[in-house]
Amino acid sequence: MINIIKYICVGVLMLNLYACSNKLEYGPDPYAGGRESVDVVFGEAAPMPSQAKPGSEVVFDVRGLLKYKDQLKFYINNIPAEIKAVSDSTLTSIVPENCSTGGVKVVVDGQIFAGPMLPIIGKISVDPTFQSGVGANGPIYSILRTSANQLFIGGSFTDYNGNAASSKISGIARITNNGEFVRGMQFGQGITGAITSMSEIANKDILISGNLTQYDTIKLVRNMTTISPTGALQVQSTPILNLTSDPAKSNLIAPVFNGGTLSPIVKSFYQNNKVTAVGQFGYYTSNYYTRSTFDNILIDNFPMGGVVRMSANGTLDDSYFVNKNTLPYKGFDGVNGVVNDAFLQDDGKLILVGAFTRFNNTQSANYIVRLKDDGNFDADFQVGSGANGFISDISYSNLTKRYLVTGAFTVFNGKPANGMALLHEDGSLDTDFHSLGFTSGTPNYSVQLSNGMTIVTGSFTKYNNVVREGFMVVDGKGNLVKDYNNTGKLVGTISDALEGTNSLGQKTVTLVGIIQSFNGKSNLGNIVRLTLLD
């Protein structure tokens, strides 16, 4: 016990001596040599003017710059901007020529100070007359204007601008030309699944397709069906086999359109009283009512490799895309990959684009192929070796008679084509068009407008080394169009677009898809309308 106390006393004595020492060594200061703190602060006042054109002077409310005036760098939307003057409370800058809407920042000795957003004035802007509010609460994949000037949107959403509280909304809605929700439509419970494509057919009904297993309370939908202009599913009383004594089980309320696919449809078309569908499906299917009972609906499947053509009521057209050299007959195998998009020409020929390299296991088809009006491979389509990477999208211009394809490729038919290629109607490359190169991403959607310009969207951050974050407007040569590239960053994916005119008589383009934000504005609800001034 005495030894234990002795050791404790010695230990306490050593601690006291150590604590009293003034010669302790702590090692080097970990913060020595750091940069001096820079006291630069942006104020709350808006820039003067609050929006500006390229080449104009703008005064920004920012303090603490004067003593660093020889070390400053200033940027507008990540583009270096000329500093005209600096005071204790302001910085005056010249808006760069290729500038677009975005945030400003000051850089002092490598330290970055973020400032406000500066809207750039140009000929394209978000349309303030479009009253979509918070829009849809899910993706919008398709937008359609009918011959009666009705607007429909389809996708995978359950609300539009807060109207779900009073109206059932599921995958489809009608809106006014100003973007407002139209009440009183007969959608019932809407769709179960998602709508990816819509077309108006001859009797003014609307063909909808996608991943659809049910419309309203009817569960006999096979990924496509028809609805009336009022939104009601087109149904009829269909005779079925009745093995009971209950006469009510002798008929079934079923969709008028009796046809579809076993797997989702990417795109569908209506032309000359025929319906053409494209997707990742392996079978055409229809409900076989003749041998069905009220409680057991039989289906009839026919092998089809991702392309099928039907009559207007859904009956299979076995003269299209069907190999009759084998018994039993079956559809062609189609492409050996994924179809991302398609376009049906006026002459019935169908162009497919996507991630595939062969058609029917025999013909080379590097990410693009055209089918004749009977569904056979079209060797006259002069795309040559095609693309060297997948194609996301194809658009057509009635004005120029050209196709624009976009995607993750750098070469098309042996020629440089960084993400974009313009094709003549015969598939040959338009050599007057040149993609000037994308940075940090690729284009994945385009719409060729009636004025000859093209909107291109995607994941890119620059085009031709000019900041264009996910959105740009190019001309028929592939150049950025002056005054039409003033808008800011697009975050999201565009699926469809529709040209129109607003209440002020201005040309508009409505974009739908999965849109998180655009031009500094969020909560757009996956739909935004732009105005394009002449």
Image (cartoon, helix red, strand yellow):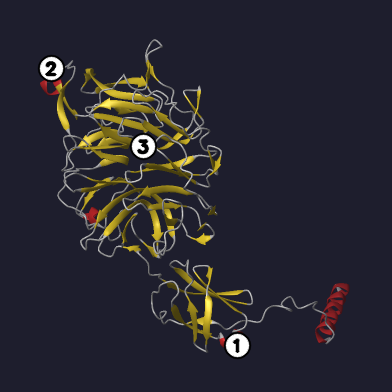
Q: Is residue 202 visible?
A: yes
Q: Is residue 289 above or below residue 188?
A: above
Q: Which mark is residue 245?
A: 2
Left or right of residue 103: residue 10: right
Q: Residue furthest bottom?
A: 88
* Mark 3 / mark 1, whichever is N-terminal: 1
Quadrant (top left/top right/bottom left/bottom right) for the C terminus = bottom left
Q: Secondary structure at mark 3?
A: strand
Distance from the alpha carbon under mark 2 to that under mark 1: 97 Å
Residue type marked 3: Phe
* Mark 2 / mark 1, whichever is N-terminal: 1
Q: Residue at x 16, y 35 (%)?
A: 203
Q: Residue at x 49, y 68 (%)?
A: 77
Q: Residue furthest top?
A: 327
- Find residue 73 and report its image quarter: bottom right
Q: Nearer the viewer, residue 398 or 253?
A: 398
Q: Secondary structure at mark 2?
A: loop
Q: Nearer the viewer, residue 53 or 238?
A: 53
Label 1 Cα crowd, 10 Å radius (few <14 / some 14-19 / many 20+)? few
Left or right of residue 130: residue 438: right
Q: Nearer the viewer, residue 439 or 424?
A: 424
Residue type marked 2: Ser
Q: Secondary structure at mark 1?
A: helix
Residue topped by disc 1: 67
Q: Are marks 2 and 1 in contact (CB under 8 Å)?
A: no
Q: Which mark is residue 343?
A: 3
- Find residue 260 and report its image quarter: top left
Label 2 Cα crowd, 10 Å radius (few <14 / some 14-19 / many 20+)? few
Q: Nearer the viewer, residue 257 or 236?
A: 257
Residue 440 placement (x, y as % from top left)? 55, 54
